Structure formats: structure tokens, C-alpha cells
Image (cartoon, grey):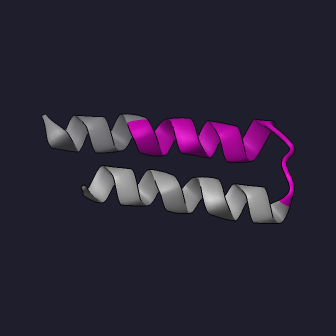
Amino acid sequence: MPGTILIVVGFLLWLVNRYIPTAGSIKTILNSVVVIVVVL
């Protein structure tokens, strides 16, 4: 089950990075937060 969550989160993150234009620093912070949340 955690693996499925990881895949879904990763996919959503990819979609955000791919299709939503954001500043580099904002994207880096967002990615870091998501990774930290997933790890915890």
C-alpha cells in the first residue's frame, strides 16, 4: 500500500512540474516538502 501512495504522489508531482509553470525555487521547495512528507 505505501508503494502505491508513493507512485501516486510521484505522478502528481510530475504532473505539477510538467504542466504548471512555477518559479524554480518554488518548485524545489514543493518537491522537498513532498519528499519529506512521503519519507515520514
The magenta segment:
9-23
Query: Is 22 a magenta residue?
Result: yes
At which x and y percent is residue 11?
49, 39
Q: Which residue is pictured at 73% across the width and 44% down the height?
A: 18
Q: Is residue 27 above or below residue 11?
A: below
17 horizontally vs 12: left or right: right
At which x and y percent is residue 12?
53, 35
Q: Which residue is pictured at 81% across the width and 63% down the height?
A: 24
Q: Is residue 27 above or below residue 17?
A: below
Main SS of the magenta segment? helix
| Residue at the limit of the structure toward the left, as seen here | 1
Query: Is 36 a magenta residue?
Result: no
Q: Which residue is pictured at 28% across the width and 59% down the height?
A: 39
Which quadrant would residue 19 be assigned to in this image? top right
Quick one: 2 or 32, which is closer to the camera? Answer: 32
Q: Please give the count of numbered marks on the rendered protein.
A: 0
Q: Quadrant of the N terminus?
A: top left
23 horizontally vs 30: left or right: right
Which quadrant would residue 31 be assigned to in this image? bottom right
At which x and y percent is residue 33?
50, 56
Which quadrant would residue 28 be assigned to in this image? bottom right
At which x and y percent is residue 40?
24, 55
Q: Is residue 10 above or below residue 29?
A: above
